[in-house]
Amino acid sequence: MRNEVKYFANFQHMAARDARPRDEGDTMPVAFTEQQFGLLPSVGDYVSIQNAETGASFSGKVQSRLFSYIQPQGNSDAHCLINIVVADTDDDWGLLIKE
């Protein structure tokens, strides 16, 4: 029997002055399986994360995406952990969309 892959995405903020992204934890939890649709931003896409209560809020441009595939021992589902780094940008957000 073939197990399915469960996908989990995490966003990290890379401030302009930082050499590495910040570990904010689960800023905007995203989880889906092979049978579900999961829309993730690509490198170069703009992202705005606004957390009303908990977690970090930030915006910027996707700098990188790292896909880590893990197959646990036994008959359990495989996991794909997707880390998306969002870097600060000086781009004018007012030119991206008219609200």
Image (cartoon, rainbow, N blue to C red):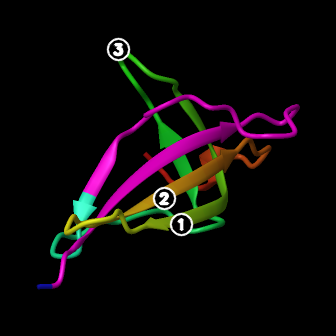
Mark 1: amino acid:
Phe
Q: Rounded to the nearest whole Å, what is the CA distance between mark 3 and mark 1?
A: 28 Å
**Do the numbered discs 1 and 2 sit on residues whose CB atoms are within 8 Å?**
yes
Relative height, residue 20 to residue 81 (above, below): above
Q: Position of residue 49 (x, y in %)?
A: 47, 37
Q: Rounded to the nearest whole Å, what is the CA distance between mark 2 and mark 3?
A: 24 Å
Taking depth in this image into account, of 59 and 96 the one nearest to the observer is 59
Q: Which mark is residue 4?
A: none
Mark 3: amino acid:
Glu
Q: Secondary structure at mark 3?
A: loop
Mark before the other along the chain sequence, 2 or 3: 3
Q: Position of residue 50 (x, y in %)?
A: 44, 30
Q: Is residue 84 left or right of residue 53?
A: right
Mark 2: amino acid:
Ile
Taking depth in this image into account, of 91 and 4 the one nearest to the observer is 4
Q: Rounded to the nearest whole Å, what is the CA distance between mark 1 and mark 2?
A: 5 Å
Q: Which residue is mark 3?
A: 53
Indicate which label's residue lies in the foreground, 2 or 3. Answer: 2
Part of the protein shown in magenta: 2-31
Q: Secondary structure at mark 2?
A: strand
Mark 1 nearby-residue class (10 Å; few <14, some 14–19, many ≥20): some
Q: Which residue sits at x=66%, y=53%?
A: 61
Mark 2 nearby-residue class (10 Å; few <14, some 14–19, many ≥20): some
Q: Which residue is mark 2?
A: 82
